[in-house]
Amino acid sequence: MKLNCPMPVLDYDIITLGHGSGGLLTNRLLDKTIFDILQNDKLETRHDGAILPLEGKYAFSTDSFVISPIFFPGGDIGELAVNGTVNDIAMCGAIPQYLSLGFIIEEGLKMEEFWDVLIGIKYACEKAGVQIVTGDTKVVEKGSGDKIFVNTTGIGVLHPKANIGSENIKVGDKIIVSGNIATHGVAILSVRKGLEFETTIESDTRNLNFIVKELLDEYGEDIHLFRDPTRGGVAATLNEIARDIQQGIELKQIALPIDSQVDAACEILGLDPLYVANEGIFIAFVDGSIADELLKKLKKMTYGEDAQIIGEVSSDHPGKVIIESAIGGKRVVNMQVGEQLPRIC
Amino acid sequence: MKLNCPMPVLDYDIITLGHGSGGLLTNRLLDKTIFDILQNDKLETRHDGAILPLEGKYAFSTDSFVISPIFFPGGDIGELAVNGTVNDIAMCGAIPQYLSLGFIIEEGLKMEEFWDVLIGIKYACEKAGVQIVTGDTKVVEKGSGDKIFVNTTGIGVLHPKANIGSENIKVGDKIIVSGNIATHGVAILSVRKGLEFETTIESDTRNLNFIVKELLDEYGEDIHLFRDPTRGGVAATLNEIARDIQQGIELKQIALPIDSQVDAACEILGLDPLYVANEGIFIAFVDGSIADELLKKLKKMTYGEDAQIIGEVSSDHPGKVIIESAIGGKRVVNMQVGEQLPRIC
């Protein structure tokens, strides 16, 4: 366990419909668990919402997490839900500060599991330096949900030097990925029912807000775009960007950082790592002139050790992503049509 | 239909897992539905989040909606999800402005139903004067959800004259309810499987932000608290407040506004209307000196026509809610323990 938070004594071993009633059971549960473990001055008012003093430009982002299983190598749905929204805010060039937290719990969830999810949330909040300031808990009947779904919505103040937007991208921009690709997806697959295989691969769920801030402090407007290639992987993210900017994107296969176990697992499972979900890496489009220097710096930061320049923006084949293999062959990387791996986040 | 928005031609009749993949199907669905129907300048950037200029004190609130059925007399889950968060923001004494929108869809949802939910959202946003500025769509396998769950999280600027907080409540404060109680819960019950009964009762889902603003314009700090008695009804809300302020709350049964059909349905079903959920009313604690005048004004406003003073704050029986019957008998109104009516919102 990441935090030493012993579970409180509760009247129930499982979550019941009554815990979502808004009545006494709800109140007792919230007092003994959520309010106790996540306490801060804003949560304490227990009103319908939190009051926040804000001043300037803010990023606002939401994500629902429906990952299965809810506990997986390297993390849990609680940690993922905090990191996911923290990273979405960071990708806007902002510094995440406040999160809301919404639970949809399936009747019958073990209280112990709920507690462990809360610990994951607390741990991730502390690591990322954000606060849960308001929340909501609903319970649905058995069979109308799947253990627990978590929504987080975040607010963060824009970095004063940030100017993030696909409209800033130009031909010659270098594309940097901050870490190994495909790790999260393969970690989840390794524990999926009917597919379990043994590896030491762990999800890369983690908060990227501090390295993003450090890069913005240093390189400001020379960073044209941040994106985290979650669902749909690097391929989906780059295809969306290529379509938006109506320029081409050229990747070098050999430059893609990938863990050898992950690579082997992808080969065995017939997955292209470009399409596998990530949680703890970003893709940055940066001015060609500072790319090498930025990469050098990034590689020295926590979570940036495996960063690589994986390609660049080109005026050829606008709207398309092209990858060059180790032996020089080129192919188009399309966006996948449907679902390679459901409920990966 | 509330808005004349013909459904676009789509490749699929139902939502599939692929629509939640983050790939081509997701992109096509979002383009043709959500982005098209809810379009505004902030959604257009299609980044991970929206950038909002904010200045001052803001209320921030979240709610997940899991109501069953998703279409009901007087509304649908989309409308409810917008109004619910709009009202939570208003209850903080703030003017709602921006919402995020998170869908968790069960594979197999009819595209037509999804479209109708979106229309409900658009309609409610227009009525309340708020914008959806960022969102997220997840799809879970059949049997892991129930049609569609909706999370909305909102931001609104605090009214300059608002000073809302249970710490402002004092003995002698009058308690005003803005409309008929128990309507929403009974409307939902009337269409629940196995319980259908015929009435013309419709849910009271509606946005309260404009009447709240008008009252704050006029009475500012003399309004000590707003709350919307949703899940758990008037009883749960007043019990929470009584506990917070450690004063007593005294209600008069005869003063409780209730529609005669709703009253009759509650009697037949053995429900106490005080415990039945509401969506479109608020409870206000106001200074005794302005209560009559405020009530008079409120009764002239849209959605305030049925408002009543239902009781007051007393120094007797601290922490408890007491109700006096028509013939003078008094009883304690406890918070309900468990669930009277699951998935009511």
Image (cartoon, coloured by chain):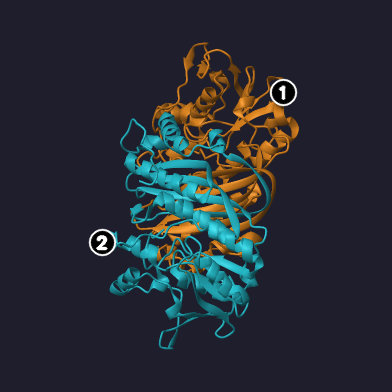
Chain colours: A cyan, B orange
Looking at the image, is mark 2 or mark 1 nearer the viewer? 2
Q: Which mark is residue B290?
A: 1
Residue at 64% across / 50% down in the picture?
B130
Extreme-bottom residue of the structure: A328
Snapshot quadrant of residue A24: top left
Q: Which mark is residue A196?
A: 2
Helix, strand or loop under label 2: loop
Residue at 33% across / 56% down in the picture?
A73
Q: Is residue B311 above or below residue B190?
A: above
Image position, residue A326 (x, y; %) = 41, 84
Same-chain check, marks 2 and 1? no
Q: Note whether residue A212 is visible.
A: yes
Q: Chain of mark 2?
A: A
Helix, strand or loop under label 1: helix
Image position, residue A289 (x, y; %) = 62, 76
Q: Note whether residue B78 is visible.
A: no
Q: Are marks 2 and 1 in contact (CB under 8 Å)?
A: no
**Three-letter residue code for mark 2:** Glu
Image position, residue A138 (x, y; %) = 43, 42
User: Total label count?
Assistant: 2
Image position, residue A58 (x, y; %) = 64, 53
Q: Is residue A190 above or below residue A268?
A: above
Give the side of residue A302 with respect to residue B223, left or right.
Answer: left
